[in-house]
């Protein structure tokens, strides 16, 4: 479960902080074609946090979002934002019948499960999606990139592309694409997380903090560039995040 103290930081940053704006741009570039090709009506946001992204999806695509989170702290922010159909529940034991949704979205949630105990969450996401429906995931990538922010937020593990695809395949999901993202800034991240942070030896703290406007624009520009590259069907060999889009296997 995410550190409850991080919800306030996220709620204050989701509209304007470069990372949130940039990752939304990447996600929308990948989801826009799917929204045009497939009829998705009822969509679960499993681990919705503040509900902000669920509202963005509902407004952009007209999906009937069902935001779910284990922590009531995040759901309270969702209620204040005007999110509807909020549900408190565990991603590893979803309180819905099988095949209840046309798609399930889960952004940066599975990293909060201890390594080796994450498979039930993958299985549950597959269970509640109808055959032929979509599972859309984003997770933190590569153990080498664990940071003070990771520790503060309660991150328990990070994924490689092969481990993520293996987990969803075991759950009965056919991978349509699995791509690293937030890749252009990878050298900066390595220098910060593996050199600077060990040197200063400060305790874990949130990385969701305001940046000077010039820096915010520069960092956002890197993600905006990635959105065009990924949207054109290309990929990166590594990155700070992993995005997977899969389809639940049809009933034989």
Image (spheres, helix red, strand yellow):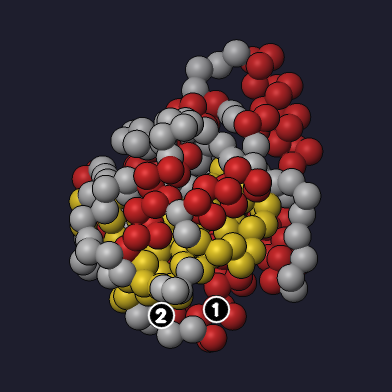
Residue toward you, 95 or 237: 95
| Residue 231, image x, y percentages | 69, 71
The answer to whether any part of residue 65 appears in the image is no
Crowding at dot 2, Cα within 10 Å, few <14 / some 14-19 / many 20+, comes out as: some
Which residue is depicted at the point 37% across and 44% down?
A: 120
Is residue 96 found left or right of 152 in the rendered image? Answer: left
Crowding at dot 1, Cα within 10 Å, few <14 / some 14-19 / many 20+, comes out as: some
Which residue is depicted at the point 53% across and 86% down?
A: 36
| Residue 168, image x, y percentages | 51, 53
Quarter holding the N terminus?
top left
The answer to whether any part of residue 116 appears in the image is yes
Q: At numbered mark 1, what does the secondary structure look like: helix, strand or loop?
A: helix
Do residues under tags 1 and 2 come within 8 Å of each other at their CB atoms?
yes
Residue 34: numbered disc:
1
| Residue 135, image x, y percentages | 46, 63
Which residue is depicted at the point 41% across and 73% down?
A: 251
């Amino acid at each position: 479960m995410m550190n409850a103290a991080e919800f306030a930081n996220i709620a204050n940053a989701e509209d304007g902080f470069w990372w949130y704006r940039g990752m939304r741009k990447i996600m929308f570039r990948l989801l826009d074609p799917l929204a045009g090709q497939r009829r998705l009506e009822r969509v679960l946001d499993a681990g919705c946090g503040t509900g902000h992204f669920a509202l963005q999806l509902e407004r952009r695509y007209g999906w009937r979002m069902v935001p779910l989170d284990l922590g009531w702290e995040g759901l309270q922010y969702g209620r204040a934002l005007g999110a509807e159909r909020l549900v408190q529940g565990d991603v590893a034991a979803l309180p819905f019948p099988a095949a209840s949704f046309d798609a399930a979205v889960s952004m940066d949630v599975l990293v909060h499960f201890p390594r080796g105990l994450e498979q039930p969450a993958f299985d549950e996401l597959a269970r509640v999606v109808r055959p032929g429906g979509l599972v859309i995931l984003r997770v933190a990538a590569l153990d080498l990139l664990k940071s003070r922010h990771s520790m503060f937020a309660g991150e328990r593990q990070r994924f490689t592309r092969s481990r993520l695809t293996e987990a969803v395949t075991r759950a009965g999901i056919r991978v349509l694409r699995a791509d690293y993202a937030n890749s252009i800034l990878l050298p900066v991240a390595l220098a910060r997380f593996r050199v600077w942070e060990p040197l200063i030896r400060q305790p874990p703290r949130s990385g969701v903090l305001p940046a000077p406007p010039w820096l915010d624009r520069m960092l956002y520009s890197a993600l905006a560039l990635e959105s065009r590259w990924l949207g054109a069907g290309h990929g990166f060999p590594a990155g700070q995040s992993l995005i997977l889009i899969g389809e639940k296997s049809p009933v034989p």
